[in-house]
Image: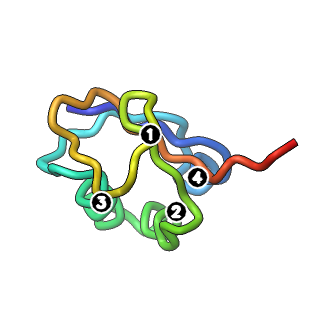
């Protein structure tokens, strides 16, 4: 089981801020594919991965990052300067 957190427009498209997911994914990319296969709203939220950033256990990561031992994955848009 892994906690998946959604922020900003990702949360709006999926319709919830957080969920606990049972997954066999070994990388973030595999987790994304599992989520996209669930429902259209997930497919829309993850349709353009270049518009997303990911953190594994609160550390910025790439989509090929391993999930072994991870407890949390967060998806969010790129940060803008200010």
N-terminal label among 1 and 2: 2
**Where, quadrant-wise, is the C terminus in this rendering?**
top right
List the residue tagged with mark 4.
10
List the residue tagged with mark 1.
55
The quarter holding residue 32 reads bottom left
- How packed mark 2 is, by other alpha carbons closer than 10 Å (few <14, some 14-19, many 20 or more), is many
User: Which residue of the protein is positioned furthest toward the left in this rendering?
Assistant: 24
Please name the residue shown 52% across and 72% down the image: 48
From mark 1 to mark 3, how far is it between C-alphas?
12 Å
Above or below for 30 versus 80: below
From mark 4 to mark 2, how far is it between C-alphas?
6 Å
Name the residue nearer the viewer: 59 or 9: 59
Q: Position of residue 61 (x, y in %)?
A: 40, 45
> Would residue 6 be found to the left or right of residue 24 on screen?
right
**Where, quadrant-wise, is the N terminus in this rendering?**
top left
List the residue tagged with mark 3.
29
- Label 3 element class: helix
**Badges 4 and 2: C-beta atoms under 8 Å apart?**
yes
**Badges 3 and 2: C-beta atoms under 8 Å apart?**
no
List the residue tagged with mark 2.
45
- Label 1 element class: strand
């Amino acid at each position: 089981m892994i906690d998946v957190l959604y922020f900003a427009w990702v949360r709006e498209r999926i319709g919830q801020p957080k969920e606990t997911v049972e997954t066999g994914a070994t990388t973030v990319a595999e987790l994304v594919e599992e989520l996209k296969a669930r429902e259209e709203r997930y497919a829309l939220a993850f349709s353009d991965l270049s518009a997303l950033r990911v953190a594994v256990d609160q550390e910025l990561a790439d989509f090929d990052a391993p999930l072994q031992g991870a407890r949390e994955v967060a998806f969010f848009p790129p940060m803008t300067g200010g």
